[in-house]
Amino acid sequence: MDKILFNIIRLKIMSTLISVDTCDFNYLLKITESTKGNLSIQLKKLGGEKYINVNKCFENNYPKTRYKITSKGVRLFEKFFKDIQTLKKN
Amino acid sequence: MDTKEHIEIINQMINKTKEQLRPFSLNLIFWGALISIMSIIYFNLLHLFETDMHHILFWTIIPFFGAVFMTNYNIKMGREIGYETHLSRTIKIIWSIFGIAWLFIILLSAIQGFAGATIQFLILFTSAICLLISGILIKFLPVTLGGASILLILTLSSLIPEISYTYVNLFSLSLGFTIPGLFLYFHKSNE
């Protein structure tokens, strides 16, 4: 089983990113019901493991970060989902 | 946390992300209304358009500013929503290509000197195809029927050569854009 996705916040992030094309930090903050600090740490972890792509840009002079799941992330998320379904059946 | 809870979290997160079709419906209403109003003005003040350049300017400058206004609105809405689904990205690409096609048609008609009817036919035909694709993709029948109705109007107008461009525009834009846009705006799952 994938240890990265065992964390609840990381699982919430990946479940959200699998259903959208891109999303920003504020949306993830709202949907995961996490704190800014914790979310940043978990996003950094997922980015470091290449599960997600992080795109930083400026919009109206304000920094904006957008997140997108990578093909590796999709593959591992699907594997994780299959694994937990198998575990549930057993 | 057990496996059941993991599956529940995944389901919850996926279900929280809803398809946002309201901005698309407002785009349809805006373009339907703008071009219909422009058609009425054009028809009633036809005497003001003395040269080909007047016609081209009227049908290029106002839609150009309309495009700038709607692009700003779409960017602002994208920021407010905070995410973009795969479907909304596809719709965005389709209509961006329509925008490029529109510019290409205008440019080509300025170089080649196409007749007004040819330009109108090309733009309406391209928009009908984009509407058909969008309607099928979002699985919303009124938008698909809107695209089909523009194709039908274009076929009928080619059989009646004396028909006014204004009527073709008015019927096409109302049936193809404004009415499906209003249906989509008030659609329950879009709230």
Image: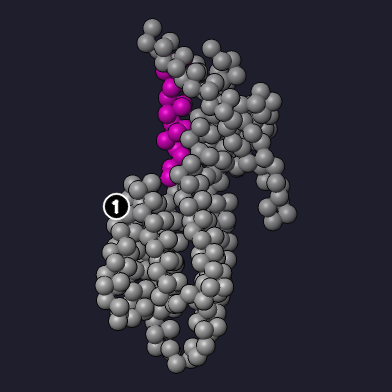
- The main secondary structure of the magenta stretch is helix
Closer to us: A44 or B100: B100
Spot the residue most to the front. Answer: B112
What residue is drawn where x is 46% and y is 20%? A81
| Badge 1 density bin: few <14, some 14–19, many ≥20, Cα 10 Å | some
Chain ID at mark 1: B
Residue B63 falls left or right of residue B138:
right
B154 left or right of A47 in image: left
At 55% across and 18% down in the image, what residue appears? A6
> Label 1 sits on what residue type?
Leu
Query: For mark 1, what is the residue?
Result: B141
Residue at image position (36%, 79%) is: B166
Would residue B164 be counted in the magenta stretch? no
Q: Residue at x 52, y 56 (%)?
A: B96
Measured as percent of width and height from the top left, residue B7 is found at 43, 22
Q: Is residue B5 magenta?
A: yes
- Measured as percent of width and height from the top left, residue A89 is found at 37, 11
